[in-house]
């Protein structure tokens, strides 16, 4: 029951709150509707002349600001207020519009006003939120643009459209009505909305950069409203005054024009009076007399506007025959028209000038109602009378015209009464005129300052227009004068209207100046008031803040006193327990506090440490330095740190790391120093031990470097003999079994050299002696040459190796050519080693951030995840049994990783067991310009025996190397002399030069007894043996880049690394030992029979190699290498035995073999074999 009572109570509370909310909304809507009506009525009162249209509509500002402040629930108030105001406006024009039309117009206009206010409020809330948040002047301008120019388009568009559809306004007035409406709403919103938005009646404030803007009080809002209202009132009064003044000026011009019109018509009337006098003075008026009279009037000058002058005879049926006889005698062909049987006819007897009025002769004017009415009125009244608007029969343009009629009575007969006048009438003197000509040139202002509109009768209907000086257009005159004139017994309504020229001449900006100045003053007052409110709020806030700060400061001060006392206690306790020495001095350096640790550090007693006693305990070598630093710290007031020694009484030394800082009082004055000292004696001992260990480590590293250099030299020297003599034996064309064994020896030696190179490279990297030599490298060619180096190994396992290069990569890159090739070959060798089937792909890819990625992908056995990090450590392989199954030292990947890091990159790996491996080198990508440097030969090329012997001096201390290199040189066709050291070489060079048999070149070892190769080279260069005169080529086991650079800096021209290979030696000698191509011209004699036999034997061997290569399974990398070498030898010696044509053809075959790719070998080898057989005449073998 209690829960049910609680729920019932809650429900009733919610119902009560909902009811109160509905009542509040209803009250607000009613208040808004009333305010809209009142402000709308004031807006109507703000209408100014001439059209008395409302220029400012404050009600639109009331609507927009009310919905912005109180929300969308107030839209009914806007709709009701707008509807009532527009009904009231319509009722003012009830005579021109019915009640249904008024109500429909009011409803549609109210809908437009409501939509306009809702849209403006929604746009502002959507863009700036609620409360409105502004951050800059741009936000203020944007909000004003959204509310005023944009949103104010809605109500004018809907209202003007409805008024046009209901025929309340013409099509020509749509644009002007829309612009006026839009301006009214725009000014109303612009003036009223800010005042209401800043008023005190909303529950939220506008935020400026996150801070609320102070709002007006009710009094200030009222003052602002009064100021704006006063401004609008002053504007209206000024505008009306200016308009009345200009209207009076215009009325003067209209009156002047009216007087001119009356004067002209009076002149017409006087001319008719003169004609009447002529009739009275003469018994009979002949046509010539009348013609003479009219001509004497000179109407073009004195009676402008008259079309002529004539007289009309009244004719009855009784007098008709006599009248016709007389007229036909005077005017042959005369006739009366139109035909009529009327009892009285008024026939024009004569009119002059006849040329322009011939059509009027014989016209019965009484046959037409308006002419008859005027003629009879003139007869009966005796007054000159103008007809109503007619069309003259003689006017071909059919313009509005008139007849001015004056009755002529029989002299001697009475004509006082109407009857007497009718009996006495003998004729009408009349003058026809056209309205346009009548109005021409009345006054100078006509057509310039004013336009004239004359209407026939008391109304101003378009159908009654007599004359209009200006065509009907869009101009709406601001000033006009309308009068009804009684002219010659006719009522004309004349309306004078101002022209744009007149309006511009009297236009002033007084009203608008009052409006703008008043609004400016109001806004300045509003801004100043707002500023005052903000300053007042800020001052109150600062008072509150300062009061709070004072209270907090008092609290803090009390807490500080307590904290200071507590700090003193803590400081004393901490200082007594601190392991670091703490002391304090005054500004003169006298110690006044020291803890136990400081006493222990200085080795002084409590009494001895006080005063300057602590300074006396400092080591004599440190004392002056401490005093100088102490004086500097005291003068500059800065913290300083120093290491110093204290001498203890027992002779011991204590090292102290001392930090001192200034101590100041509350006024910032320096009163002393506080210091903290830490005993660092143990650290100093360790530093000395570390320095000694570092010296020993450096000595060990230097010894290691010397050992490595010696190891390289000592191992390469015997290996030089093994590899060199093996190559020489292979060039002696041994038997097949011997060749196989020699090749095994060569391969084993090369494997050992590779292992040695790995160990030495790793040692140099570990010792920090590896130096990279960046140079331009053709990436595509470098990858292909690396693949070519291991192509034979891959081919033996049946593994295709493909190279893919990203086209986005530059052709030339900058890197260490040798180390790049070393890494690629190592990664490729590992891929071949651990892949038994599938394929191998080398990709070069450009990664973001200028990174080059060269990855080697294989389909091999893969690497276990737990071993993928370990294999980059030295002497570690992917699998435990890998070394036994595949061989290797486990240094390859470790060297690759270290070389990559030296290049600024890394080696990364991704592998799954049984699925293959991807190992990638990632290094910075630097594009290079120019062409790549030619790499040193890496394959053994068969020597070409020179035909002119050159004297070469070999400087070498090792007997095996002497024998090996001299044998190679002799096979190359050179004469060799041997020196065992540098000093002996210098002597032999001097001696040969003195005998006139200088050496063509010197091969110089570097490490020799008595004098090394570097010293010997520098000595020879100083003695004048320049590079052109005596080239010197180093031959050394030191084959690193810095070693080669050192040789070149010493004056050498090249470098051949041990173990010496014949191809390397030949390549090094070739640039310096030039020989001609035509060997027969050089030798001057035919080759010996023995040489011819050897040449034919070589042809047979090459033919056999071609046959093997063309066999189905005979094309191997070994066969290719043998063919290239053999053809190289043959191309160099064929000139001795064959014609120039045959020699050239053999060289073409050799060059083709050098250029072929692997695919071209398979496709073209048979054709090359057949061509070789055809050229040399060898018997065909089974191809």
Image: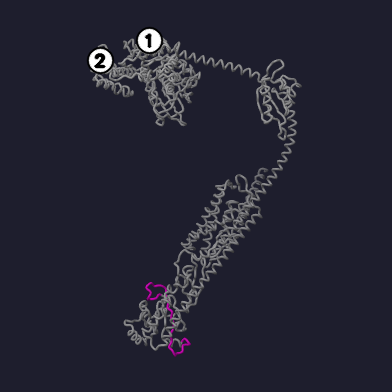
Q: Is residue 240 magenta?
A: no
- Of the image marks 2 and 1, the number of the one nearer the N terminus: 1
Outermost residue toward the right in this view: 607
**Which residue is painted at 56% across and 65% down in the image?**
242
Where residue 318 appears, x then y in whole percent?
37, 88
Where residue 603 appears, x then y in whole percent?
72, 19
Residue highlighted by disc 1: 963
For residue 629, above or below residue 197: above
Residue highlighted by disc 2: 1085
Outermost residue toward the front in this view: 994
Task: Locate residue 717: give its quadrant.
Answer: top left
Task: Locate residue 1054: give its quadrant.
Answer: top left
Q: Separation of disc 2 and disc 1 at Cα?
A: 31 Å
Secondary structure beneath dot 1 equals: helix
Res. 632 in view:
yes
Where residue 215 appears, x then y in whole percent?
64, 50
């Amino acid at each position: 029951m209690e829960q049910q009572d609680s729920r019932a109570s809650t429900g009733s509370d919610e119902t009560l709150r909902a009811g109160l909310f509905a009542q509040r909304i209803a009250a607000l809507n009613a208040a808004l509707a009333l305010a809209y009506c009142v402000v709308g009525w004031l807006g109507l009162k703000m209408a100014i002349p001439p059209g008395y249209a409302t220029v400012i509509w404050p009600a639109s500002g009331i609507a927009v600001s009310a919905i912005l402040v109180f929300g969308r629930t107030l839209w009914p108030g806007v709709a009701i207020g707008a509807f009532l105001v527009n009904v009231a406006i319509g009722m003012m024009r009830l005579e021109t519009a019915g009640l249904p039309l008024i109500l429909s117009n009011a409803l549609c206009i109210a809908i437009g006003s409501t939509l306009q206010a809702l849209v403006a409020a929604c746009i502002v809330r959507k863009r700036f939120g609620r409360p409105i948040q502004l951050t800059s002047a741009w936000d203020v301008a944007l909000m004003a643009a959204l509310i005023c120019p944009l949103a104010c388009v809605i109500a004018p568009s809907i209202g003007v459209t409805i008024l046009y559809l209901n025929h309340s306004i013409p099509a020509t007035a749509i644009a002007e009505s829309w612009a006026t409406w839009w301006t009214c709403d725009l000014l109303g919103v612009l003036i009223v909305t800010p005042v209401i938005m800043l008023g005190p009646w909303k529950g939220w404030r506008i935020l400026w950069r996150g801070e609320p803007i102070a709002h007006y009080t009710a009094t200030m809002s009222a003052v602002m409203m009064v100021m704006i209202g006063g401004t609008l009132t002053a504007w209206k009064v000024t505008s009306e005054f200016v308009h009345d003044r200009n209207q009076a000026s215009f009325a003067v011009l209209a009156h002047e024009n009216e007087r001119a019109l009356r004067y002209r018509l009076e002149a017409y009337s006087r001319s008719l009076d003169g004609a009447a006098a002529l009739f009275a003075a003469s018994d009979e008026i002949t046509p010539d007399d009348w013609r003479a009279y009219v001509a004497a009037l000179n109407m073009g000058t004195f009676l402008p506007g008259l079309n002529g002058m004539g007289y009309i005879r009244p004719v009855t049926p009784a007098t008709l025959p006599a009248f016709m006889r007389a007229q036909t005698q005077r005017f042959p062909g005369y006739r009366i028209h139109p035909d009529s049987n009327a009892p009285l006819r008024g026939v024009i007897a004569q009119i002059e000038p006849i040329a322009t009025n011939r059509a009027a002769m014989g016209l019965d004017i009484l046959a037409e109602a308006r002419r008859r009415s005027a003629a009879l009125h003139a007869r009966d009244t005796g007054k000159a009378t103008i007809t109503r608007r007619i069309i003259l029969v003689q006017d071909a343009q059919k313009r509005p015209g008139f007849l001015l009629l004056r009755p002529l009575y029989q002299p001697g007969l009475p004509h006082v009464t109407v009857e007497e006048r009718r009996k006495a009438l003998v004729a009408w003197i009349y003058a026809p005129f056209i309205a346009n000509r009548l109005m021409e040139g009345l006054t100078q202002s006509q057509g310039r300052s004013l336009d004239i509109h004359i209407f026939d009768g008391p109304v101003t209907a378009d159908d009654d227009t007599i004359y209009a000086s200006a065509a009907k257009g869009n101009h709406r005159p601001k000033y006009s004068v309308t009068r009804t004139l009684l002219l010659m017994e006719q009522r004309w309504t004349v309306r004078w209207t101002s022209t744009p020229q007149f309006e511009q001449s009297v236009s002033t900006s007084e009203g608008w100046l009052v409006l703008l100045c008043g609004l400016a003053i109001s806004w300045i007052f509003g801004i100043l008031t707002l500023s005052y409110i903000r300053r007042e709020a800020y001052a109150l806030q600062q008072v509150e803040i300062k009061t709070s700060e004072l209270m907090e400061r008092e609290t803090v001060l009390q807490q500080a006193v307590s904290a200071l006392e507590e700090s003193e206690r803590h400081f004393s306790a901490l200082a007594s327990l601190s392991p670091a020495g703490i002391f304090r001095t005054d500004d003169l350096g006298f110690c006044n506090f020291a803890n136990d640790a400081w006493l222990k550090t200085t080795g002084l007693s409590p009494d001895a440490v006080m005063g300057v006693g602590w300074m006396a305990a400092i080591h004599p070598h440190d004392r002056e330095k401490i005093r100088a630093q102490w004086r500097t710290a005291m003068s500059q007031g800065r913290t300083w740190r120093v290491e110093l020694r204290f001498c203890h009484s027992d002779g011991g030394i204590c090292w102290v790391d001392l930090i001192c800082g200034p101590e100041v009082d509350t006024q910032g004055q320096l009163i002393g120093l506080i210091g903290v000292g830490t005993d660092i004696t143990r650290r100093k001992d360790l530093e000395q031990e570390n320095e000694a260990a570092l010296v020993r480590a450096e000595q060990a590293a230097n010894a290691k470097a010397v050992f490595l250099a010696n190891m390289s030299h000592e191992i390469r020297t015997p290996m030089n003999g093994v590899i060199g003599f093996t190559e020489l034996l292979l060039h002696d064309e041994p038997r097949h079994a011997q060749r196989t064994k020699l090749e095994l020896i060569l391969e084993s030696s090369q494997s050992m050299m590779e292992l040695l190179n790995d160990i030495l490279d790793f040692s140099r990297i570990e010792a920090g002696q590896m130096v990279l030599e960046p140079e331009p490298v053709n990436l595509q060619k470098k990858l292909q040459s690396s693949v070519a180096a291991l192509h034979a190994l891959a081919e033996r396992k049946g593994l295709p190796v493909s190279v893919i290069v990203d086209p986005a990569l530059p052709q030339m890159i900058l890197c260490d050519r040798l180390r790049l090739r070393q890494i690629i070959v190592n990664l490729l060798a590992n891929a071949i080693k651990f892949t038994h089937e599938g394929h191998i792909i080398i990709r070069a890819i450009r990664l973001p951030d200028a990174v080059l990625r060269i990855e080697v992908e294989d389909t091999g056995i893969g690497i276990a995840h737990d071993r993928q990090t370990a294999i980059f450590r030295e002497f570690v392989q992917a699998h435990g049994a890998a070394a036994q199954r595949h061989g290797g030292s486990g240094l390859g990947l470790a060297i690759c990783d270290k070389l990559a890091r030296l290049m600024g990159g890394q080696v990364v790996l991704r592998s799954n067991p049984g699925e293959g491996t991807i190992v990638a080198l990632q290094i910075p990508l630097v594009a290079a310009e120019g062409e790549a440097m030619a790499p040193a030969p890496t394959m053994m090329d068969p020597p070409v025996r020179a035909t002119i012997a050159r004297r070469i001096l070999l400087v070498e201390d090792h007997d095996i190397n002497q024998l090996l290199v001299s044998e190679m040189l002799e096979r190359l066709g050179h004469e060799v002399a041997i020196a065992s050291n540098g000093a002996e070489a210098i002597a032999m060079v001097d001696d040969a030069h003195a005998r006139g048999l200088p050496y063509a070149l010197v091969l110089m070892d570097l490490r020799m007894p008595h004098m090394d190769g570097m010293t010997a080279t520098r000595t020879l260069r100083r003695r004048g043996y320049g590079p052109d005169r005596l080239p010197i080529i180093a031959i050394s086991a030191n084959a690193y880049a810095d070693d080669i650079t050192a040789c070149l800096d010493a004056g050498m021209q090249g470098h051949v690394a041990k173990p010496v290979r014949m191809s390397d030696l030949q390549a090094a000698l070739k640039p310096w030992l030039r020989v001609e191509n035509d060997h027969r011209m050089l030798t001057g004699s035919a080759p010996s029979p023995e040489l011819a036999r050897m040449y034919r034997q070589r042809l047979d061997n090459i033919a056999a190699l071609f046959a093997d290569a063309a066999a189905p399974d005979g094309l191997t990398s070994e066969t290719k290498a043998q063919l290239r070498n053999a053809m190289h030898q043959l191309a160099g010696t064929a000139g001795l035995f064959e014609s120039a044509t045959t020699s050239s053809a053999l060289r073409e075959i050799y060059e083709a073999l050098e250029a072929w790719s692997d695919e071209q070998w398979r496709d073209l080898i048979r054709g090359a074999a057949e061509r070789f057989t055809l050229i040399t005449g060898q018997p065909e073998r089974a191809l």
